[in-house]
Image (cartoon, rainbow, N blue to C red):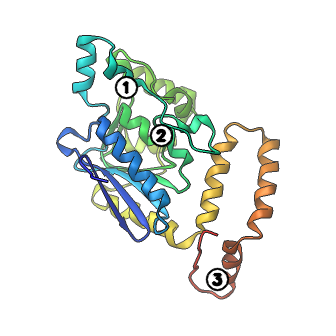
Amino acid sequence: MAHQETLYQVTDRVATITLNRPDKLNAWTGTMEQEVRASIHEAEQDPDVRVIILTGAGRGFCAGADMSLLGEIAQKGVGERASALANTSNGQRAGVRPDFQKKYSYFPSIQKPVIAAVNGPAVGLGFVITLYCDLRFASDAARFGTAFARRGLIAEYGLAWMLPRLIGPANALDMLFSARLVEANEALRMGLVNRVFPQDQFLEGVRAYAKELAYSVSPRSMRVMKDQVYAAMFQTLSEAFESSEQEMLQSLQCEDFKEGVAHFLQKRAPAFTGK
């Protein structure tokens, strides 16, 4: 597909999707939304890709929804453009629960790890998108903020469900009520991000982690574990336990299990196929 507002690159089994409106701090548009979704599905279907990175060009990750759209809605009232902004349905995927088929909540349904590489401010909608990624790595220049309360808005796109699950209700309400910017190290203490890298080593550090996943662990294991973790959000412990027993029996019959044992015993690098 043509890329007007994003970049797409595959290197070392890692697909990197870059939001590419650096002069606007990568403010989110309808075009960007379509390109990101198409690129993520392209990476998911590509057998040469095992990990996906989502990042931003320039000094920001994403400053949220483009203010020209919000300004138009504020002046003219709710109309077709506002309805499009609020639309949360984007088609159906067989075997995926409806919760993970909404406008931005589809990231957990992607069968490969998705890493948000937050290189700078991630605010409003840009912040929401990072939450639906599986992992969040931040540079020490990253900042996180909800922004919505300062615009007379609310916790959008399932934010009130996802954020407390990551950082707890009290921290979530603090970020929602105050709409303050949270710096990278505080985000790390909250559990909002997995790791913080110095800005001058940021993408190198994220890519090294992604490459480690791409070459050293079973793609099948990652795929099943991701499904287990997100499914468990809706399960009892008993249900999750029973599901894991079934998955374990299936994994013992797979090629990646045989390879996992073989490369360990033979003291060599693994050659997982994802089967």
Density class for disc 2 (Cα within 10 Å; few <14, some 14-19, many ≥20) is many
What's the residue type where badge 3 is placed? Answer: His
User: Secondary structure beneath disc 3?
Assistant: helix
Distance of mark 3 from mark 2, alpha carbons?
35 Å
At x 51%, y 29%, the residue is 158
Nearest to viewer (mark 1 / mark 2): 1
Instruction: Look at mark 3 in the image and give the residue it sits on.
Output: 263
In this rendering, position of residue 25 left or right of residue 223: left
Image quarter in which the C terminus is found: bottom right
Mark before the other along the chain sequence, 1 or 3 = 1
User: Secondary structure beneath disc 1?
Assistant: helix
At x 41%, y 46%, the residue is 37
The image position of residue 22, as x and y in percent, is: 20, 45
Density class for disc 1 (Cα within 10 Å; few <14, some 14-19, many ≥20) is few
The image position of residue 115, as x and y in percent, is: 45, 53
What's the residue type where badge 1 is placed? Answer: Ala
